[in-house]
Image (cartoon, helix red, strand yellow):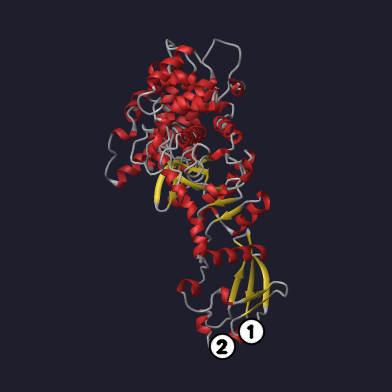
């Protein structure tokens, strides 16, 4: 640290809140060492900026929700940033393009999570995060950095994007391959810049024109005299995939006939492209809301002051002695919009295990849980999932009247069920549901059920006996126990801990704008989310280091000291 930079920055920081960038340098020192990024930054070539410094700049950029240009401006004129980076006061800073190149290198070398790993390692050494204890996880939608397009617009814009790429890469070849003047008029302007015809028949005809032109372009690219590398262009690859997903073409002696695929003939949502510019974005649906893009899953610690390890001597509680320990993000995962929460339960635990930060209790909503997952997480990771499960969906349970499955006594050893009137089942057989899920079918003899005086309260069948469906024993017992717990007021009070993750998502949206992706592609969007997580952790640590009161929340993200949502 240059002595003059430190002297001037500290003198200026006396007035007003102490800057976040300076606090991070004071408390954590050189957080991101250059050696950690050596794989992505070689030693040969022209001198460049320190990758460790660029990592810190990017974190602080996202902490203030700045663009790359604004971050570069802060680097030139911000004294607090020069202090954090250890620069001389007359250092001219860097160009905004350096940040873009830095992010690209991290993605190319699979180092998206490096900055979060380094921060959590430093915090583990200080006793601020640890394995065991409590954590909670939830997800929210992320809009891709592309425009929403209907099927007609999507076809036209995909073809236009491919033509633009070919016009830049091989203009002479394109001029010979397609009717440039006609197509320039049709595909020159972006599709969203003009209104398509209102008539359904004209829109259908336009879609077929797009389809025929697209197939003609793909044929031209794949002719023997066309350069082979043209077909490898990303825009051409997207065009080919989009046409396979949206059009049929039948070639006969009469010629080629192009038809649009009907809705029922479209590929599943997980495979269906939603934009020619972001091939990873997908259409998502959650709680009645549609969007195009991704989902982000955030995991954070949520220990209370009473949960601290006595062996630590209270070391981690010194700065915030009047309140609970800081809630810190321990993991962040990004998926396309079609991936369900339940599919991410195991990957989230693998992610936490890789950092040696598995909790003892993990608070989740019902979207992450099933009997199989509750058993699997306990068996494979030693983690107890504290989560509601879906209630019994039988007609009797939904109506709240009659004899649902819990009214029957199950003898697993004898493979027999007993009804409320004491009659026993006559059929017990394993089965497979939808070809994958193992269940057990139990049936009662129709001759036993037919004369039963409470038959109407037990089954809706007019002639047959009662039938029960159970999961395998271990799963069914876990499910029954979880359903029983959910009715307990003490369990509900304990589960209320999960609600705090909603505050974290709100903070992430308010401070960083996490629901709108800045970049294209899943990898860069995940990199963005990792930097968001580090930025939020530093904001929360800043508030905790200063012992800031928890109830002062009516401020913008620019007053970063007041934005710790630790409750």
Place of residue 122 in the rendered image (x, y in percent of width and height, measured from the top left)? 58, 31
Determine whether, in the image, residue 543 is placed left or right of residue 30.
left
Q: Quadrant of residue 64?
A: top left
- Residue 30: in sight, yes or no? yes
Residue on which disc 1 sits:
423
Earlier in the chain: of badge 1 and badge 2, it is 1
Q: Indicate whether 566 appears above or below 439.
A: above
Q: Indicate whether 349 appears above or below 275.
A: below
Q: Name the secondary structure under disc 2.
A: loop
Residue sitting at x 59%, y 34%: 126
Determine whether, in the image, residue 377 is placed left or right of residue 116.
right
Q: Quadrant of residue 162?
A: top left
- Residue 250: in sight, yes or no? no
Q: Label for residue 90?
A: none
Place of residue 485 in the rendered image (x, y in percent of width and height, measured from the top left)? 55, 64
Judge the density around disc 2: few (<14), some (14-19), many (≥20) Cα neighbours within 10 Å. few
- Could you tell me how many numbered marks the image carries? 2
Residue sitting at x 51%, y 20%: 53
Q: Indicate whether 506 appears above or below 455.
A: above
Residue sitting at x 57%, y 49%: 307
Label 1 – label 2 distance at C-alpha: 10 Å
Is there a contact, CB below 8 Å, between mark 1 and mark 2? Answer: yes
Residue on which disc 2 sits:
452
Q: Quadrant of residue 557?
A: top left
């Amino acid at each position: 640290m240059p002595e003059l930079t430190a002297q001037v920055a500290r003198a200026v920081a006396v007035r007003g809140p102490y800057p976040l960038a300076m606090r991070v340098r004071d408390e954590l020192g050189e957080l991101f060492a250059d050696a950690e990024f050596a794989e992505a930054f070689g030693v040969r070539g022209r001198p460049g900026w320190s990758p460790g410094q660029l990592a810190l700049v990017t974190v602080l950029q996202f902490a203030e929700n700045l663009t790359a240009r604004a971050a570069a401006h802060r680097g030139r004129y911000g004294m607090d940033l020069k202090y954090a980076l250890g620069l001389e006061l007359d250092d001219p800073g860097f160009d905004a393009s350096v940040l873009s190149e830095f992010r690209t290198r991290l993605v190319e070398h699979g180092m998206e999570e490096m900055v979060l790993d380094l921060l959590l390692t430093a915090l583990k050494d200080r006793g601020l995060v640890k394995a065991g204890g409590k954590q909670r996880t939830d997800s929210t939608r992320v809009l891709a950095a592309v425009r929403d397009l209907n099927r007609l617009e999507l076809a036209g814009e995909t073809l236009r994007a491919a033509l633009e790429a070919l016009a830049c890469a091989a203009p002479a070849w394109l001029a010979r391959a397609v009717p440039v003047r006609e197509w320039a008029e049709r595909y020159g302007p972006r599709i969203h810049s003009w209104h398509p015809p209102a008539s359904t028949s004209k829109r259908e005809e336009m879609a077929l024109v797009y389809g025929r032109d697209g197939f003609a372009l793909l044929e031209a690219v794949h002719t023997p005299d066309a350069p082979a590398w043209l077909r490898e262009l990303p825009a051409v690859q997207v065009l080919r995939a989009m046409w396979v997903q949206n059009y049929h073409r039948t070639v006969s002696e009469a010629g080629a006939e192009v038809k649009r695929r009907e809705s029922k003939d479209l590929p599943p949502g997980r495979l269906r492209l939603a934009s020619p510019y972001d091939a990873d974005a997908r259409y998502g649906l959650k709680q009645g809301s549609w969007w195009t893009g991704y989902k982000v899953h955030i995991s954070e610690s949520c220990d209370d002051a009473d949960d601290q390890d006595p062996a630590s001597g209270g070391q981690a509680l010194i700065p915030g002695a009047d309140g609970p320990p800081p809630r810190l993000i321990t993991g962040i995962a990004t998926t396309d919009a079609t991936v369900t929460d339940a599919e991410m339960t195991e990957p989230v635990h693998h992610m936490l295990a890789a950092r040696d930060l598995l909790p003892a209790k993990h608070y989740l909503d019902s979207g992450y849980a099933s009997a199989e997952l509750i058993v699997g997480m306990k068996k494979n990771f030693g983690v107890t999932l504290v989560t509601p499960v879906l209630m019994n969906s039988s007609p009797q349970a939904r109506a709240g009247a009659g004899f649902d499955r819990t009214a029957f006594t199950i003898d697993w050893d004898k493979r027999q069920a007993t009804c409320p009137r004491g009659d026993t089942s006559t059929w017990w057989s394993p089965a497979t549901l939808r070809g994958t899920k193992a269940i057990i079918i139990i049936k009662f003899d129709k001759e036993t059920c037919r004369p039963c005086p409470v038959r109407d309260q037990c089954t809706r069948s007019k002639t047959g006996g009662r039938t029960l469906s159970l999961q395998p024993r271990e799963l069914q017992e876990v499910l029954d126990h979880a359903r029983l717990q959910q009715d307990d007021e003490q369990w509900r009070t304990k589960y209320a801990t999960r609600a705090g993750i909603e505050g974290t998502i709100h903070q992430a949206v308010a401070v960083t704008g996490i629901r709108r992706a800045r970049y294209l592609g899943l990898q860069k969007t995940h990199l963005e989310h990792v930097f968001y997580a580090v930025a939020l952790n530093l904001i929360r640590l800043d508030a905790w280091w200063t012992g800031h009161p928890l109830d002062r929340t009516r401020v913008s993200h620019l007053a970063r000291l007041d934005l710790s949502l630790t409750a």
